[in-house]
Image (cartoon, rainbow, N blue to C red):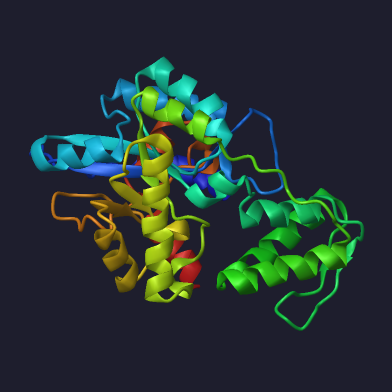
Amino acid sequence: MSTRTLRWLASFGHRAVHAADGAPTLTIVRHHRVLEDGERPLYRLGVPAGVLREQLRMLADRSWGPVTVEAGLEHLANGRGHRVALTFDDGYRDNVTHALPLLAETGGHATFYLTAGLIEERRAPWWDELSHLLTHARTARIAADGNGTPALELAGEEGRRRALAALLPGFRVPPPARTARLDRLRAQLGVADAAPCELATWDESRRLIEAGMEVGAHTLTHPHLTTLDPDGQAREIAGSADLIATRLGLRPRGLAYPGGDHDGDTIAAAAAAGLDYAVTTRAGLNRPDTPRHALLRRGFSEGTCIGPLGFSRRLALAELDGAFDGLRERRRAS
C-alpha cells in the first residue's frame, strides 16, 4: 500500500487541533509557481491550477479565507477562530496569470513575496538555470569535478530528475560558489544560452496590488542568507524592500526567508529594514505569541492533498493541521 493511500486512510481518524474556546490561530501556507494542469517541468516547484482551485474552494467553504499574512496577523491580534493565509514565493508570472483569477473566483487573498533584484535584472533564479542546463544538456553524463559535483547519468527525463535531486543540496553555498558551480556545469554540458526569466515584470507585479493582494520582500537575489555575513544579509533584505517600494510605490511589511534559511543576524536585518514580520519554512500553527519574525509556514503541494480518488478535503485538512508532521520528522531523522 502506498504512503499516499496510508495517509489518506489515517486522515479519517484525524481531529482538528484548533482551540475549542475560539482563541485566534493562523496557518500560513506556502506555494511557489502555479502550473497548468498536466504540466510537468523538470523542477516541479509549483501546484497545478486545478489543485489550487480545490484548495481555495475548501478554505472558502470553511470561512478560513484565504487571507494575506498581514490580515492574518491582524486576526491573531483581534480575532477569534481559525484563518489560513496563503503565500507565493519568488514572484513568478504565473502567480499573476493563474493564481489571481482563481483568487478572484473564490474571493480569496494572498501574499506574494518578490525576489526584487532578479525581477529588476530579468534574470532567472539559480534553480531555473540548473534545470535549464539539465534539460538542454548535450551530453548524457555529468563527470565528477572534484568541486562538489558528483558523477551523474542524464539518460531520459527520469535520469535528469534524479540528477537534479542529487545536485540541489550542493547549491546551499555562498552566491559566488553557486555561480561557479553553474558555470562549470554549463561548460561540461555544452549549454551556451541562459535560462529564460519567467518571473513577473514590475508592471505585472503591480496587478497584484491593484487586485488587493499583499506584496512582500524575498531578498534581491535569493541567496541562502546564513551563507552571507551580517552586512550582506542586510543588503539583500533592505535592498529588496527598497526596490519594491521604488518600483511599486508601496513599501512591504513582510519578508519570506529564501528557503527558510535564517539566523539571529537575519532577524536583526529584517527588523532594521522596517519589516514587521517574516515567514519561515517551519511547519506549525501560529498563535498570538508566535514571534513575528519567525512565523510558521507549511507547504501545501499537490502530493499533500491528493488521495487515491483525487483531491481529498479530509486529507488536505489533516495536512493543514500538521497531522503528518511527526511522521515526516521521524523519516528525516532515520
Q: Give the total number of marks visible in the rendering.
A: 0
Which residue reaches farthest bottom?
Answer: 146
Q: Is residue 84 above or below residue 159?
A: above
| Residue depicted at 72% across the width and 47% down the height | 42
Residue 282 placement, left or right of 6: left
**Residue 311 visible in image:** no
Picture coordinates of residue 128, whole percent (x, y): 67, 51
| Residue depicted at 35% across the width and 30% down the height | 213
- Quick one: 16 or 67, which is closer to the camera? 67
- Quick one: 51 or 66, which is closer to the camera? 66
- Quick one: 12 or 130, which is closer to the camera? 130
Q: Is residue 134 above or below residue 50?
A: below
Residue 205 placement, left or right of 139: left
Picture coordinates of residue 3, whole percent (x, y): 55, 50
Residue 124 placement, left or right of 144: left
Picture coordinates of residue 328, whole percent (x, y): 45, 59
Which residue reaches farthest right?
Answer: 139
Picture coordinates of residue 18, whole percent (x, y): 20, 42
**Residue 105 visible in image:** yes
Quarter of the rendering containing residue 75: top left
Quarter of the rendering containing residue 267: bottom left
| Residue depicted at 25% across the width and 54% down the height | 274
Q: Is residue 207 above or below residue 261?
A: above
